[in-house]
Image (cartoon, helix red, strand yellow):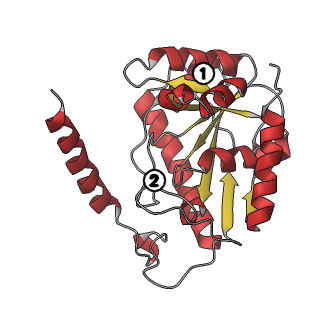
Amino acid sequence: MRDITYPPIIAGGHAFFRLLNLRFDVTGGDNLPRRGGAILASNHVSYLDFIFCGFAARPAHRLVRFMAKDSTFRHRVSGPLMRSMHHIPVNRAAGSEAFDMAVGMARDGEVVGVFPEATISQSFELKEFKTGAVRMAAAAGVPVVPMITFGGQRLWTKGHKRDMERGSLISLTLGRPMTFSGDDDPDTATAQLKASMQVLYDETVARYPAPPPDTWWWPARFGGGAPTLADMREREDRERAERESRRP
């Protein structure tokens, strides 16, 4: 697959990281295969996670093709760039087309990036997972590489103003590849993926320098001021009910 714009965009991103003096802690980068297809399954805590997941693929010298909302591809600026980098548009009303495209890319030897939570977790803990990542991996006959990104929420996340804080630490952890087949129950396989990512998440947070108590971007379970998973679920349920009530 020919890539003209992707490498320069990556170089620009790295220059931006240096400008902000961002610090990166990457663990397990060699777990991403250097050749062949794979599904890179990451948690989702910030609007910048696409960039950070791509950064974590540097040790393997891989480019990641991310699944993203189709609205991003309709934007006059981001649309041409997303298409030129061979990312995958997702129309939630007709997701089978994106699924088939992702499977085809993985079969052809590409690394496909997926966020199983689908949306940003405002608790910064792992939310419920969709089954798409394991189903794609099984259909394509490629492994799933579990990944955790943490720290990007300090810069730009849902419900908070953007704050490009200089010197912030971004921790990225990649786990060992997991293999699933078409004979595996998708719900059971997804639970196994989430369990693996929970271990990686706890390890990542444990090595991250803890901020003062009640800091807004630090998970409540560790003494931070972020909403708990239960509080976040209630909030999302209310927001979902409000959206549905406004539909004609």
Question: Measured from the top left, where is residue 195 in percent x and y?
Answer: 50, 49
Residue 247, numbered label: none
Q: Is residue 107 above or below residue 60?
A: above
Which residue is most to the bottom?
A: 212
Question: Measured from the top left, where is residue 117 in percent x and y?
Answer: 45, 43
Q: Residue at x 43, y 53 (%)?
A: 121
Q: Is residue 102 above or below residue 221?
A: above
Q: Say which quarter of the image contains residue 118.
A: top left
Name the residue tied to disc 2: 126
The alpha-carbon separation of the residues under discs 1 and 2 comes to 23 Å
> Which amino acid, by three-letter code, is at mark 2?
Leu
Of residues 213 and 173, the one nearer the viewer is 213
Name the residue tied to disc 1: 102
Q: Residue at x 31, y 58 (%)?
A: 232
In contact (CB < 8 Å): disc 1 and disc 2: no
Q: Is residue 190 above or below residue 147?
A: above
Which residue is most to the front?
A: 76
